[in-house]
Structure formats: structure tokens, C-alpha cells
Amino acid sequence: GESVGLHLPTLSVQEGDNSIINCAYSNSASDYFIWYKQESGKGPQFIIDIRSNMDKRQGQRVTVLLNKTVKHLSLQIAATQPGDSAVYFCAETFSGNTPLVFGKGTRLSVIA
Amino acid sequence: GAVVSQHPSWVICKSGTSVKIECRSLDFQATTMFWYRQFPKQSLMLMATSNEGSKATYEQGVEKDKFLINHASLTLSTLTVTSAHPEDSSFYICSARHPVSQSEAFFGQGTRLTVV
């Protein structure tokens, strides 16, 4: 099945704090997961990805954790900045030329 | 890196008219492109998969006669919203997977369609 999003939950954090955004994915067979950032009126922007044979991957200020047992993804943003304010989506897919299935999305609001 | 370009970025049209949205892969060939629709405060929902040289595959609930997809070349897919109505107003986004790794997906800038 697909992860269908109807409304966007909001996470508010103070500037400089760490943010954790969670996502539940739907297909246990998915082998590739991506986090995207979307600003108003723009297309999704790639943040970080992870394959199903990993449980953690780190980038610059961001970390993705994958828990396949409970089909859960999380995105951790260190030292959150005002420029991080946006909507964040997780997506699941298979390696190959297949479409992405997006999660609900979370709006991150950074309080200066 | 690979780039997908979408045009126009926004369009306003009258009810009953048709609107064409273009999606181009600028520096790679894309045999497959994906079209998504996003309503305000919602997630991206897959509408259809565009296949070069063959018919598009539509998701359940998406009217193929209303949303015409043409993928006539390896770098261009078009989505035409026919006989548009206000409920078709939405943000339409195209995407293509990386041609070599077929991992990362690249997205167009999106098209904001407003039907009045």
C-alpha cells in the first residue's frame, strides 16, 4: 500500500536545538529511502538517503536512521537553523526506475 | 548533477481550457518520468508514470483522458490537463531517477496550476 498524507503535523524547535523528524513507511520490501526538504512553491530538494542494508547514515548536520523492524525512518538535524524551516518528506522506493512513495510530511518551524 | 526542468512554474487558466506542462531532463536521458500532484498542506501523490515511446501508466483514480501524458523523446515528457476545472488547481511536479545509479530522484521546480 501507499503512505497517504492528509494533513501536515508541525514541529517547532528553538534555533540551535536538534530536530528529530519521524516517518513511518509502508512497504517492508522497499530498499531505498530518501529524505526531502520542500520550501513553499518549490519542488522537493534531496537531503540524504539510505539503503535498506544500513541502519544509519550521516551527512553534514543531518543523520538518517532506519528501523526496518517497525518500518520507521527518522531525520535528525543538528543545530537547527532558521533556514531549515520547511516541510520535510520521507520517501520509499526500490532501486531501479520506479516511482517514489512519499510519507505524510512534517512542517519544521524554527524559532529564532 | 542531473537536472530536471519544468515549465511553466505557474499558470492561471479559465475553466474548460487545457493546459500543457513540460518536463525536461537537461543533461541525461530519461526513459521514464513520474508525475505527481500535491494539494495544499498535503504530500506528493503519484499520478502516472510516463514511458518514452509507449503509453503512460496511471495510478488508480487518475483519469487518463483528463491528464494526457506524452513522452515523445528521451528528454521530454508533457502533461496536459484537459478541460480544466477549479478542482484541478494544484501543484504538479515531475521527476526522473538518476540514469546510471537509478537511485536518487530528481524533481522539477513544480507547476502551480490555478483554474478560475
Image: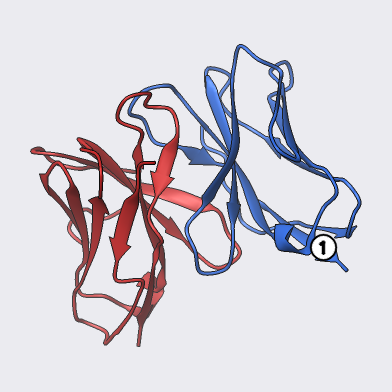
Chain colours: A blue, B red
Left or right: residue B102 compared with residue A81: left
Q: Position of residue B79 (x, y in %)?
A: 22, 59
Tell me where residue B114 sits by quadrant.
bottom left
Residue farthest to the top, as pictured: A53
Q: Position of residue A80 (x, y in %)?
A: 82, 53
The subunit carrying tag 1 is A
Question: Quarter-wise, where is residue B110 in the image?
Answer: bottom left
Q: Is residue A6 above or below residue B9?
A: above
Which amino acid lies under the numbered mark 1 shown in the image of this protein? Val
Q: Residues within 10 Å of mark 1 (few under 14, many from 20)?
A: many
Residue at 26% in and 87% down: B14
Q: Is residue B25 left or right of residue A24?
A: left
Q: Position of residue A4 (x, y in %)?
A: 56, 46
Which residue lies at the image location 33% right of the left edge and 51% below the top edge?
Answer: B4
Q: Nearer the viewer, residue B5 or B42?
A: B5
Q: Give above or below for B72 relative to A33.
A: below
Q: Quadrant of residue A33 in the image?
A: top right
| Residue bearing mark 1 | A110
Image check: A96 left or right of A4?
left
Where residue B7 appears, as percent x and y from the top left, is 28, 66
In the displayed structure image, the side of residue A87 where residue B43 appears, left or right:
left
Q: Is residue A48 above or below residue B4?
A: above
- Can residue B67 be seen by looking at this rendering? no
Give the structural element (helix, strand or loop) at label 1. strand
Q: Which residue is depicted at the point 51% across and 32% down?
A: A1
The answer to whether residue B45 shows anywhere in this view is yes
